[in-house]
Image (cartoon, rainbow, N blue to C red):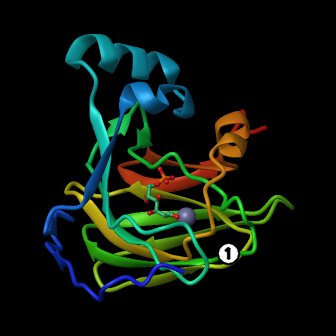
Amino acid sequence: MNLIEPFKTEIDFATGVLSPQRVIMQRRLSDMSVMYADRNAAARIQSEEGDRLIYEVQGVELPEEEGQIPHCTTRILPGRIGDEYHMTKGHYHARREQGEVYFGLSGRGYLLLQTDGGETSEIEMVAGSAAYVPPYWAHRTVNIGDEDFVFFSVWEARAGHDYGTIERDGFRKLVVLRDGQPAVVDNPVYG
Ligand code: S6P
Ligand code: ZN
């Protein structure tokens, strides 16, 4: 076990920016265009406006060993691809038995969850919402507002990330604009 000096990070709730600056990871439309249901809309946006920034993660880097507790912010920009709101890729933890906590900092979003067994759940999050991602639940976040949706995540270092299952099957539920409102609907091409 590495002995790490205690430290703190200041968080700007509106943007998710960390000070001092930590590791920044960006996901653009080209990183996930096949994850959106309306691939024509994704291709149109790509050719008309270029490679749109969808979300950004800023986090502290810690060794992936037992007891370390990584934490980060995620900022999802507002917008849609066709009818579908901007979202994260989503993942299971590689160690399925590891859970996680999300805390809303600003904006409005949905936390979509699902299990291998077919259960689904959706939790609306605003600033101040503490949402629990229990073990075994895949999780994806979606910005349903007109501003950035920003939240803070805390998990166990050995959880790891399984992106492949969601890249292959997608999520059972989509969050789309219907009659001027965000609506959670079945994904017609799941699996
Ligand atoms: C990590 C945690 C979050 C996400 C982040 C981006 O376990 O769930 O920090 O990594 O919100 O989402 P994704 O699906 O691209 O990792
Ligand atoms: Zn996670």
Residue 1 vs 18, above or below: the answer is below
Q: Residue at x 43, y 55 (%)?
A: 142
Name the one closer to the observer, 47 or 62: 62
Label 1 Cα crowd, 10 Å radius (few <14 / some 14-19 / many 20+): some
Residue 91, horizontal then vertical, whole percent: 61, 53
Residue 172 vs 158, above or below: the answer is above
Q: Residue furthest right?
A: 117
Give the left or right position of residue 43, taking residue 164 as reference.
left
Amino acid carrying label 1: it is: Gln
Can you identify the residue that label 1 sits on? 98
Residue 84, horizontal then vertical, whole percent: 45, 40
Q: Residue at x 41, y 21 (%)?
A: 41
Q: Residue at x 25, y 67 (%)?
A: 107
Residue 117 lies in quadrant: bottom right
Residue 156 vs 182, above or below: the answer is below
Residue 120 vs 43, above or below: the answer is below
